[in-house]
Image (cartoon, rainbow, N blue to C red):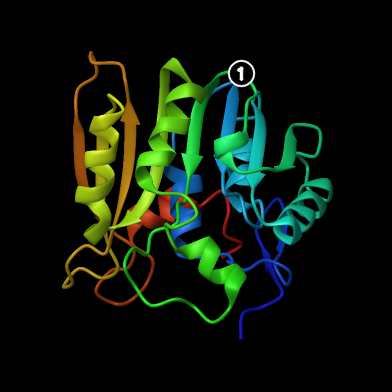
Amino acid sequence: MSNSFFRFKQFVVNQDRCAMKVGTDGTLLGAWASGGSRILDIGTGTGLIAMMMAQRFPDSSVVAIDIDRSACEQARENVADSPFAGRIMVENVPVQDFVDGKFDAVVCNPPFFVDSYGCPDDRRHIARHAESLSFDDLFRCVSGLLDAGGEFSVVIPVESFSRIDSAASMSAFRCIRKCAVKTVPRKAPRRYLLAYAKDGGREFEVSEECIEDEQHHRSAWYSALTSDFYLR
């Protein structure tokens, strides 16, 4: 059973009322994504990524949205108890209906299971399955919300890459950063950290990293990436 809370250096994430708990994917994205003065977190869940972005970019304001009312209520409480309460706003709204100007950076840990068996927990099913937000819909929405020079960052399983990259192309986005992440050195990558933009002048950056070393300790890369967040 998941713990009812997860403690980071500067904030605590309570998660007993959220379908999706604190996990490696969200932590990776929150520590890796580019930011700006105005940041949007789509599908915020517990508010983890929104608070990580607020911590990393102290001059930013963050809007965090989710379709799950209970998750939004808990995210608001988590934000209110954090040092970033004055800079994060949580809204219970689907991104398809969200209109609030332009953002310098958009982040999303998106629904990623496609054509798979449904989860018996309806709220967890909605949070994890792409029926509620397809990749095509996601990029169409982000296209209208992202500033011309902005960056859209996501974390996905490797098997979803062709679908999300195709959806990106349909909305005139191109991948500018692609980081393949392994769990351990001897295994193949399990997830991608991806950054998309419409600015055609940027060079493509590609890398491959690992979360653990051969001794199953945090790798030097992952330790450096998350050192401002994990207690130990």
When the figure is inspected, residue 185 is found, relative to residue 205, above or below; the finding is below
Q: Is residue 170 above or below residue 108?
A: above
> Residue 130 lies in what quarter of the image?
bottom left
Q: Position of residue 101 (x, y in %)?
A: 61, 18
Q: Quadrant of the N terminus?
A: bottom right
- Using the image as rendered, state which of residue 2 and residue 230 is in the foreground: 2
For label 1, the crowd category at 10 Å Cα-Cα, with few meaning under 14, some 14 to 19 and many 20 or more, is few
Residue where numbered disc 1 is placed: 101
Position of the C terminus, as image quadrant, is: bottom right
Dot 1 falls on a residue whose secondary structure is loop
Res. 176 visible in picture: no
Residue 102 in the image: x percent, y percent? 56, 18
Q: Residue at x 29, y 77 (%)?
A: 215
Instruction: Give the percent coordinates (x, y) of residue 115.
Output: 31, 67
Q: Amino acid at mark 1?
A: Gly
Q: Is residue 87 visible?
A: yes
| Side of 225 relative to 50 (left or right) | left
